[in-house]
Amino acid sequence: MQPKHSARAPVASECSESGEGLRPPAASARDEKLRKTDRVRKHREYEHAQRAGVRVSCAHVVLLLALREAASLPVRMGIIASRRAGNAVMRNRAKRQVREWFRCRKAALPGAVDLLVILKPNVAELGRGGLARELESALGPIRRRAERLGAKRLP
């Protein structure tokens, strides 16, 4: 009898150097889960980022970047996926890809900011790894805008 394969995508413990794909997991999925401190969780925090943040728009996503009150706080991420972004399967798949990109690239993002990722309706057009490549291409503009806002500069 062959072992059953999980329908859930594997969680990578580290990213490839090119940012294109994921290496097989070396740690359990529990170790890779985003902590509460890594996520934007409250409605007022989402509203603050939408009001006070700057936008970086791509073909399939919009990124909002807002400074946090204390400079020593880590970067946090939130995802907004309306029904226009596709059915539940497509939205959840895209959100998993965004979370995985954030886990792999959290150290490259400026500190003391909230990063919101808004999925556009055409996000379902992207193939495997396409969303990660698009987010990776937006990493430069994100860092420049964060530095203009006064976020902590990275090495």
Image: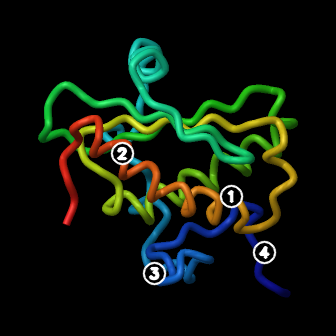
Q: Residues within 10 Å of mark 1 (few under 14, many from 20)?
A: many
Distance from disc 2 to disc 1, alpha carbons, whole Å, reads 22 Å
Badge nearest the viewer, 2 or 1: 1
Q: Residue at label 1?
A: 131
Mark 1 and mark 3 lie on one chain; the one further toward the N terminus is 3
Query: Which numbered circle lies on residue 57?
Result: none
Residue at x 29% of width, y 31% of height: 67
Which three-letter amino acid code belongs to the residue tagged 1?
A: Leu
Q: Residue at label 4?
A: 4
Mark 4 and mark 3 lie on one chain; the one further toward the N terminus is 4
Distance from disc 1 to disc 3, alpha carbons, whole Å, reads 23 Å
Mark 2 and mark 1 lie on one chain; the one further toward the N terminus is 2
Residue at x 52% of width, y 33% of height: 55
Badge nearest the viewer, 4 or 3: 3
The answer to whether mark 1 and mark 3 are in CB contact below 8 A is: no
Q: Residues within 10 Å of mark 2 (few under 14, many from 20)?
A: few
Which three-letter amino acid code belongs to the residue tagged 4?
A: Lys
Q: Residues within 10 Å of mark 3 (few under 14, many from 20)?
A: few
Residue 47 pos. (x, y %): 46, 14
The answer to whether mark 4 and mark 3 are in CB contact below 8 A is: no
Distance from disc 4 to disc 2, alpha carbons, whole Å, reads 29 Å
Q: Residue at label 2?
A: 35
Mark 4 and mark 1 lie on one chain; the one further toward the N terminus is 4
**Where the C terminus falls, by quadrant?**
bottom left
